[in-house]
Image: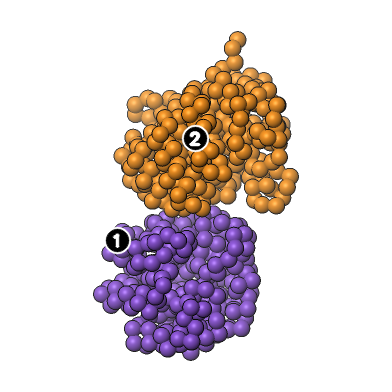
Amino acid sequence: MLPSPSSRREFLKYSGGWMAAGLAHGMQGGHRTRVIDCHAHAGHAPALTDPWTTIGDPEEILRRNREAGIDQSVIFPISNDTFEKANQEIADICRRFPGHFIGYAKHDPVNEKGRIRAMLMHECHELGLRGLKLHVHPGPEVLDTVAELGIPVIYHPARVALFEEISRNYPTVDFILAHLGADLSYDWREHLAGIDMARRYPNVYLDTGAVVLTRYIEQAMQQLGAEKIIFGSDEPEVDCRLEIFKIRMLKLPPQQEEMILGGNLLRLLGKFREKAA
Amino acid sequence: MTVIDGHALAGKGFSWAEPEREVDYDPSEMLDRAAEADIHRICVLSPRATDYQAANRYIAHICERHPERLIAFAVHSPQREAGRIRQMLTQEVNAMGLRAVRSDGHPTRELLDAAAELRIPVVYYPKRKSGSGPGRWFHMIASAYPQVRFILPHLGEYRSETWWGHMEALDLVRRYPNVYVDTSGIGSLKYLEMAAKELPAERILFASFAPELDVRVGVEAIRLLHLAPERYEAVMGGNMFRLLQKS
């Protein structure tokens, strides 16, 4: 069994120094930017009612990543009621596969109300997690904490309109709107709302995962430019090999494709604030 | 190998997925994109329409202009056009060269008797309440009309809205030798992988649902299955070719 990382240095050792390596790849001339999937789920859940309440197998993700040419995936838990144990599992998976995953915490701002600040601080500073995934709308407890930590939030809201207030009130927090606003393109109007949200707020980015109506990825690219778009898949339910093809088929200039496939996310991850000594 | 896209759209009407959205699918754009994706032939049908006789005439017209590229499918509403379907479909098949019929609404005996008589496949994607799979809509028609070949689009669940819709489609193909699935508009590729692994390859038909969806994504989805060459050829066109030859 692998030891728990007691410090950031130890986490980086087990994670293969992803941050340093990633930034080096991304920022220095002549190096290829690391390809990162910003949206994947891993670990277990107790409900056993749907794939996303049962298991997300990291080895399955790695197998497809290898075929797709993806260097790393951001992973966070599948659906649980509370996430302390699930987030620990994410940290464990990151240690078990050094260099292949970037772990994010997930929390339920309602079910875990009052405990989130302490948990998130612990998860980022001690477990080495570097972002937050949300399905439930966050309040000040969550948003003040992520602002303090300098971590990005990837949020899959019930409606894109829910982004309005949080994006305006927390301009220092980077929000990634999952699925370009509409999981599996369930409503194309939500894609349009997502593009509009990203245009109006400099701190809103769009994740491309599980977008079936790919013309809206093209539209986002045309209207917003590459700097607001971040490649994601929603593995293991949605196949990263097909999702990355949806970016590559845009046939963008290499610099723009690199921004979408990893550069933009690395820039956001670089804002993490270490614990004061 | 002749690659046949088994499900594409042309003309004016309303979206199959969203009845309130007006669409106008340009056949020349579809042809250009298909050529780029190395697709040789395309089965094309109308979007949802208020007048299918006119819509089918338009489809026949564009197919006449591109006889080497396009294969015309009819669409009819068994409920709205009750009493007239046999006559219309017979003319469309025998005089205008249409090769299959999509049923806009649950197929009636009138439509299925006509399809059986004309020996054409029936494309049917049950419109159902969100959260319900295609199973209950297919059991009766597939068992009552074993001589009719049914094509269930989107592996039973457009955009993979539910995972059990796909699972029900797999079960339908296993149970009924006259049920086929098309591969268009699948959001979660793992269910297509299951189909490729668990179903007879001759019952899977490559399709794109272009131009509503990007044909290149549809082709890539099949490529990612890593099928053996003969199975790949069957899925990409051989199966549809044989299905239409029996007509």
Q: Amino acid at mark 1?
A: Glu
Residue reaching furthest to the left: B65
Percent from the top left, x then y, of residue B201?
Answer: 52, 69
Query: How many numbered marks are there?
Result: 2
Snapshot quadrant of residue B72: bottom left
* Chain B, colour shown: purple
Residue designated by label 2:
A164
**Mark 1 and mark 2: Cα distance apart in space:** 37 Å
Front in this rendered view, residue B211 or B1? B211
Percent from the top left, x then y, of residue A151?
Answer: 54, 26
Residue designated by label 1:
B29
Element type at mark 2: helix
Snapshot quadrant of residue A203: top left
A127 sits left or right of B57 in the view: right
Front in this rendered view, residue B78 or A121? B78
Residue at the spot x=51%, y=26% of the render?
A170
Q: Amino acid at mark 2?
A: Glu
In the image, residue A276 above or below residue A240: above
* Chain A, colour shown: orange
